[in-house]
Every structure is written in C-alpha cells, then in structure tokens.
Amino acid sequence: MRRQSVAVAAGTPTAMATDQRRNPDWLAEMPQRLWTHLEPVRRGVRARLEVDTRALAAMRIALGTIILADLLHRAGSLETYYTDAGAYPLAAYEATYSRFTGLSIHAWSGELWFQQLLFVVAGAFAVALILGYRTRIVGAISFVLLFSLHARNPAMLNGADRLLRVVLFVALLTPLGERWSVDALRRGTARTTVVGTVTAAVLLQPVVVFTQNAVLKHQGETWYSGEALGIALTDDEMTILLGNHLAEYPMLLEALTWGWVILLSGSVVFLLGTRGWLRALAVGAYLGAFAGMALSMSVGLFPFVLAASLLPFIQRPFWDALERVAPNRLTQWRPKRSWLGPLERPPLEHRVLASLRERGYESLASFVPTYGRSLLTVAGVLVVAWMLLFGAAHASEYDVPDAMDSPHLDEQRWGLYAPDPSDSYGWFVFEAELTNGASVDAFDGGELTFDRPPDAAQEYESFRERKFLESVRDSGTGDETGIIARSYGEWACEQAAETHDAAVEEITVHRFVQQQPIDGESEAEPNSYVPLEWSC
C-alpha cells in the first residue's frame, strides 16, 4: 500500500508546533515577536504622548506669568495677611493648619520688610522662569517659594492654588526650557519634540482633574440634569461680569451646562484619544470654556492654571501653522548668543562634561546624562502612579493604604462646584460700636446697613479676602479655639479705630445667608448669625 504525504502549510498550528519542536528557543523569542506585532499600537500611543517643545515653552511662559501676576495681586494686601501687624500674625499661623508647620520660609519673620523681600525674590525667579534661564533649577526654587507662600496663610487659599502647585511640580519634570529660552540660546541646540513618562505625566494631570470632577459632579443632582450653571450663576457672591447677565438666558445656560459636562467626562477621548488638528480643536473648546469661567465666576486662578495645563496638548501642526501666518519679521528674528553677555558661555554642567570627554573620560561623561534621564523616567512613573492613585481614591471615596497616606501627597482633589453648586450665597457686615455708643460700618466709615447688597461679589476687595473671611466665619462658629477669628477681631479693632479716628468698644461680624434668588429676586428674608463678637 502506497503512503501518501500531506504537505503542511507554513503558518498553520501544525507548522507552528513543528517549528517549536525544531527551535527550542521559541519561548525566549515570544516577547520580541509580541513587541513587533504591537508596533502599530506603540506608534499610536507615542504619537499621542509626544509633546512639541514649543508647547512646553508656552506652558513655561504661562506658569511664570501666573506666578508673577499672583504675587502682584497678593502684594496689595501683603501687610494684612502675611505680617504680625495684620489679621493673621505668626502666632495664629503656628497655632493653626499644623500640616504646614515649619514648611514656610515666609514664617521666619512677621516683619513687613521680610515679606517684601521674599515677594521681590519670588518675582525675580518668576521672570527668570518666563525667560527660560536655568529653567529646572529656577522652576524648582519658584515652586519652593510658592509652597512657602501658600503655607504661610492657608486660610486664604482655594483649589486653584493647589492646582498651580501640582501643575508646576509635574511640569518641572519636562524640558520646559528646550525652546524659546535663554537655556536654548546658550546650548545652541534644541529638540523639536519629546516623549516619555514625563510627558505622559504632564498630559495626564489635567485629564485626572477633569475626570475626577466629572465623577464627583455625577454624585449630585443638578449637573447631569442641565440645571447646575443656572444655579451657580445665581450665586451673587461668586458671579461677576458676564455671569451677571447670563441668568437671563436659561436655555443657553442649560446648553452650556451639558457642554461642560461633556468636556469633563469625555476628556480622556477628546484630549488623549486625539492628535494633530483634531486635538487642537478639542483644546480650543476647553480654552473657550475657561475664558467663559474667568469672565463669569470669581474662582481665582482656576481658569488660567487649567489653560496653562492644556498647552502641552497642542501639537506640531498648530505651531507650524502659527509660524506660517505670523509676520516674517517675527518668525525670522533670532536672538544672538552675544546678547547674553556674561551668560553667553554654555551652562556649567555642559562645560564639565565637555572637559571630561577631552580628558578621556567618555564613559563617565556619557553615564551622567544617561543616569539623569533614567531618574526622570522613574520620577515620571511615580508621578503618574501618584495622580492616578490619589485621584481615584478621592473620586471613589476609598482611602489609600496607611503606609503611603500623607496630607502632603493628598493633593489630587478637584471638587470645584461638585457635587452641586450651592443653593445659597452670603455676605458680611462689619459693625463697630464706638465708645460714644454709635454703631458704624467698621471699615468703610459710612452708615451701617444690613440690606442685601446689589452685588455681593463687589463686597470683597478680591477673592482672596472672600476666602479669608470664610475661614474667619468657620473659626468663629466651628473651631473650639477660634484662633483665626480672634486674630481677625484684634486686627479689625485697630483698623476701625484708625478709620473712624475714635476709640472702638466692640467689633461684631454679621453673616447673612440668602437662598438663591429666582428670576433675579427672592421673597425669602436672609438668615443671619454672628460668627465673631470681639471686645476691643
């Protein structure tokens, strides 16, 4: 009987099994084969995590400008909130917010001159960050000074200040000074794009903010029903400029509410899932929302820091197009290294590495930058793990393991207007009783009135004052020690006496709370209580 041979086609399971028997190393080759097969996926991920260095330069300039503008804004009330002559002296600082005890350089002295000096130094470093001189070192010092400033008076901070700290910290892992900088001019070279774990971290941070906020808003009742912005913009204490007029267009507010919810909940898709011009359009939508926020709500630095955090998403097509439409005299202008004067020479570390190579220590000169890049890679992984772990824990209300829990790491909390906007707003009235028995407005010097103000937001000099007075209110009503309230009472006595040029017997702070008005009016009378009554 004749045997018939059957040909085995290459690539069939039978053929693969035969190859495996003939090649005992097939198991060792499997990772390489899998890596090769995943090449299209890796290219797609890389394209979405790649950051144009011009975008990083824009982010650096934006963050430096925000820090500088914030310093100028705070300088107007420097004595009030940062010195022993103000409403929050060092004694109050040392007795409250123990989380920040010992972490503030600004708390080394309560003298005005010392605070002025630190503000000038911080401003100088902010300018250096904008210019991109020794970017990572200057940025790190700016971060330390920013944290120190925040730690000196946490009573006047809001979530935007925490966001600024976090975004600046994460951004410093990336090469912010690669383009449009003094550093680039000194080096003479610059990369056009960068990609790695550090770019993944800087891109992921705003997505964590948006996604967590979307989850927290879902726990409420008004955002996912289209009502939230209509309620938020009736908060007269927080509504400014454009927001004072939008309440007249309820259908528009409902559409804007749904639009904002879609942007928040879809940020993973809109920002991380796109690239090129499609991503630029998505970023434009977010920037438009932030502009509307800045013109409608008194939320501090939030819209500006959020806008800065999205700049790294803008990729090469946009920047190339921007250069094409910009005036030739601007795009063709190039600064000269000689303009730097004594700073013309390459950075010290570059000169040291060059000297090592000249002396034959090539391996050592190569090891140092390689080791530095490895450290940044590890740092990027740790930062991504930090933002995902703590961000998810806050959104899901689960606690992180005790071994890694720390108030200094628990910074990934983003609950602006979540789960629902407030259904009431309030204002303060400051009554000073003079020794002659007269009751007057403590600070304005005018007639004392308890009527609802026409615009509660205008009752405060700034959002910083509003936040501090909220801390005074909380201290006077819920804090057993009441240290912040008592410090404010002592300061208010001095200010009232100076304003009226008369002796002050007592300071009384009244807090009025009004339910949100409907169609611009409210029939209910405001509730009132006294969070602080202080004998001078």
Image (cartoon, helix red, strand yellow):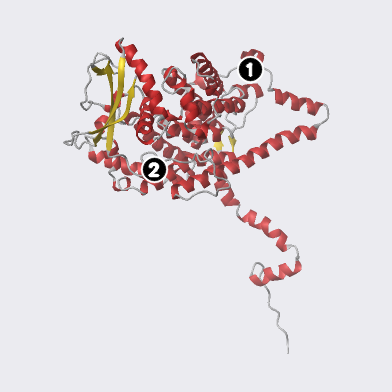
- Judged from this view, the residue extending furthest toward the bottom is 1
- Front residue of 236/174: it is 236
State the image coordinates of residue 410 (x, y, percent, origin top left): 51, 41
Q: CA distance from mark 2 to mark 1?
A: 44 Å
Can the viewer see residue 334 in this picture? yes
Instruction: Pick whichever, 123 or 464, lies toward us.
Output: 464
Label 1 packing within 10 angstroms: few (<14), some (14-19), many (20+)? some
Seen from the viewer's position, the closer of residues 172 and 426 is: 426
305 relative to 238 in the view: left or right? right
Give the residue number, with chain letter if any, for mark 2.
263
Asked if 164 appears above or below 383 in the picture, the reply is: above
Residue 217 lies in what quarter of the image?
top left
- Give the residue number, with chain letter if any, for mark 1: 337
Give, as a three-letter code, the residue at label 1: Arg
Residue 136 falls left or right of residue 419: right
Residue at (51%, 13%) from the top-left corner?
Answer: 113
Q: Residue at x 50, y 39 (%)?
A: 411
Say whether residue 355 is left or right of residue 148.
Answer: right
Residue 153 horizontal/vertical position (percent): 46, 27
Q: Residue flagged by tag 2: what amino acid is it?
A: Leu
Identity of the residue furthest to the top in this view: 501
**Looking at the figure, which quarter contains the N terminus?**
bottom right
The percent coordinates of residue 513 (x first, y second) are: 26, 34
Q: Which mark is residue 362?
A: none
Residue at (21%, 36%) from the top-left corner?
517
